[in-house]
Structure formats: C-alpha cells, structure tokens
Amino acid sequence: MSDCIFCKIVDGSIPSTKIYEDDHVYAFMDVAPLTKGHTLLVPKQHVKDLFEMPEEVARNLYAAAPKIANAIKSAFNPQGMNTINNNGSFAGQTVFHYHLHFIPRYDETDGLKVKWETKQSEFTQEVLKSFGEQIREKLNL
Ligand code: AMP
Ligand code: ZN
C-alpha cells in the first residue's frame, strides 16, 4: 500500500534496523522502544489488522515469531517477554499495517502494565456459557 509506513519499511524506501527477513515477513527494531530489544514483526503483505489477516499470512508470521523471540532472549537475557498486537485505534493501534510487538521485560518499573483488574464477579458461569455459544456460532466451523 503506497501510503503505509510499514510497507515502505518492507520495500526499503524508509530505513529501518532490520532483524530478520524471509519471503513472507520482516522484523525490525521499534524506533520508539519501551525496552532494550523492542522489536516489531510484520507480514510483507499489507494487512491492516488481525481481523483482516488471511490464515496463510498468519501461519507464515507466527512461524517466524519463536526465532525472533529467542534471538532477542539470547542477545539480552530478559526476565520475560510480552508479545503484543493492538487491533484498532481504540485498542492502541497507531500504524495500520499489522505488527506484533516483542517487548523484552527486565524489571517491573519499565512502564508496561499488563495486569488487569478482573471483573470475574460480573461474569457468572451461566453468562460465560452464553458468551461462548455466541462466539462459537460465528466461527462457521
Ligand atoms: P502500535 O501503537 O501498536 O500501532 O505500534 C506502532 C509502533 O510502531 C510504535 O511502537 C512505534 O514506535 C513504531 N514505529 C512507528 N514508525 C516506525 C518506524 N519508522 N520505524 C520503526 N518503528 C516505528
Ligand atoms: Zn502496509
């Protein structure tokens, strides 16, 4: 897509610090990282978000993910790593070409909050069962 910043990174018309590339995916350092080693993995094909991702693209993208995670782990020996993908601006997506963040974690003061306050008391087993049914109906298995 001509006005997409990550398509331009993939085709080399915008510079990036490349980590990995194969026929299907491209991984590069996030220009505004949260922690040392914060990396982005994108499909070469322009796909806006997870909702629009063809299965084949997902297969190829995730096939590369462990390689990248392990390379970052070997390089910097973090305590842990979050892989995060934001879909839609409400969920925090700012670049509308799918990307998976690899965020190595070194200490709890790095500014990433991934703990949430559970609303478990609002969701009884009956309610969860009904939600499950509603989602399954849409899967067209
Ligand atoms: P998100 O908010 O999940 O859409 O993440 C977009 C990410 O892309 C942010 O973490 C940005 O720092 C990163 N980003 C934006 N432009 C560039 C660029 N030219 N090179 C590398 N990373 C970028
Ligand atoms: Zn794109």
Image (cartoon, rainbow, N blue to C red):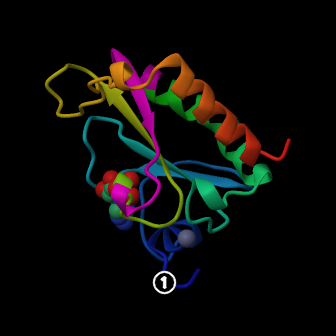
Return the residue at label 1: 3
Q: Residue 33 appears at what percent x and percent y?
A: 27, 46
Give the residue at the far front of this rendering.
126
Above or below, comparing residue 140 to residue 132 in the picture: below
What residue is at 61 percent from the left and 25 percent from the top? 129
Q: Residue 80 appears at what percent x and percent y?
A: 38, 18
Q: Which residues are magenta?
A: 73-90
What residue is at 59 percent from the left and 80 percent from the top? 1
Above or below, comparing residue 7 to residue 82 in the picture: below
Q: Nearer the viewer, residue 91 or 4?
A: 91
Above or below, comparing residue 60 to residue 96 in the picture: above
Q: Which of the 4 quarters of the picture holds residue 43?
A: bottom right
What residue is at 70 percent from the left and 47 percent from the top? 58
The answer to whether residue 16 of the structure is visible from this angle is yes
Q: Is residue 80 magenta?
A: yes
Q: Nearer the viewer, residue 139 or 43?
A: 139
Q: Nearer the viewer, residue 18 or 31?
A: 31
Q: Nearer the viewer, residue 113 or 42?
A: 113
Q: Amino acid at mark 1?
A: Asp
Q: Is residue 97 left or right of residue 64?
A: left
The residue carrying mark 1 has its beta carbon less than 8 Å from ligand 2: no
Give the residue at the far bottom of this rendering.
2
Q: Residue 21 appears at what percent x and percent y?
A: 63, 51
Secondary structure at badge 1 equals loop
